[in-house]
Amino acid sequence: MSEFRLHCFAMSGNSYKVALFLALAGQDWEPVLVDYFGGQTHQEQWRQEVNELGEVPVLEHKGAKLSQSALILDYLAETTGKFGPANASEKHAIWRWMLFDNHKFTSYFATLRYLYGIKQTGETELTQFLRERATAAYRIVDDHLRQTPFLVSERPTIADLSLAGYVYMPEETGMPESEFPNIAKWKDRIRNLAGWRHPYDLMPGPTSLSIL
Ligand SMILES: N[C@@H](CCC(=O)N[C@@H](CS)C(=O)NCC(=O)O)C(=O)O
């Protein structure tokens, strides 16, 4: 059995944050496919055995099961010595960006992508609201990345991997991509790191609802 087991599915950007860490850090890991679209995360047994919060990613390591991507990334940085902070001030900066990511950058965008890009609800009041909120978060990140190649340092850290969760997803979301030139360059920098792979190559499972 591999050292790390990641409960995940291809279309889960939150899982990709962790899968990308494991790939870039050259770790011995294997994905465990979760049938999210078949309702597995809602099953009582899955919740009891894997994650009572009903979410992926879940990382299994040395008999423990960890959930919440930011916490898993922090754990992996500490355990492997890779992509972590060099000092206390970097640690605080990393957590600041990971919390911003969980509350705003990932969450509004991921919900917009799910409705507009995957379920294809068409434009609604809700998708408009989500796009406005996601765009505001993207603007903040784009402004920040004008001054620095990666979010908290000259080198990539787990903060970058957290915010990178959904940025390579291919579905149409109607986001004003051309307004974010610094995010585009940052995405290229991450894509050029040794070991980078697209989420749909790194994790198993469907990559479109139409093939379910
Ligand atoms: N804050 C969590 C979010 C995890 C999350 O929302 N995962 C989605 C898949 S990408 C999920 O499992 N959702 C289940 C549900 O909402 O029912 C993290 O960063 O791990």
Image (tube, helix red, strand yellow):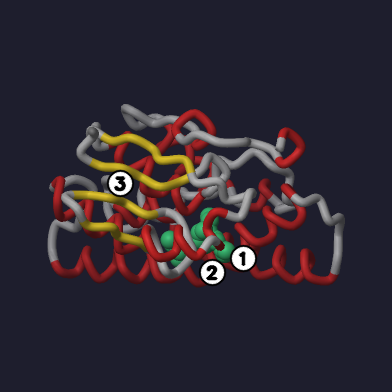
* Image position, residue 22 (x, y; %): 30, 39
| Disc 1/disc 2 C-alpha distance (Å) | 6 Å
Label 1 or label 3, whichever comes before in sequence order: 1
Residue 32 visible here: yes
Q: Are marks 1 and 2 in contact (CB under 8 Å)?
A: yes
x 78%, y 70%: residue: 126
Corner quadrant of residue 82: top left
| Left or right relative to 181: residue 176 | right
Residue 148 visible here: no
Nearer the viewer's eye, disc 3 or disc 2? Answer: 2
| Disc 1/disc 3 C-alpha distance (Å) | 23 Å
Quadrant for the N terminus, please.
top left
Label 3 or label 2, whichever comes before in sequence order: 2
* Image position, residue 136 (x, y; %): 62, 68
Q: How many marks?
A: 3
Indicate the amino acid at tag 3: Pro
Q: Which residue is mark 1?
A: 108
| Disc 3/disc 2 C-alpha distance (Å) | 21 Å
In this orientation, which residue lies closer to the viewer: 51 or 94? 51
Where disc 1 sits, the SS reads helix
* Image position, residue 168 (x, y; %): 55, 40
Residue most extreme to the front: 45
Q: Which residue is mark 2?
A: 104
Q: Which residue is mark 3?
A: 156
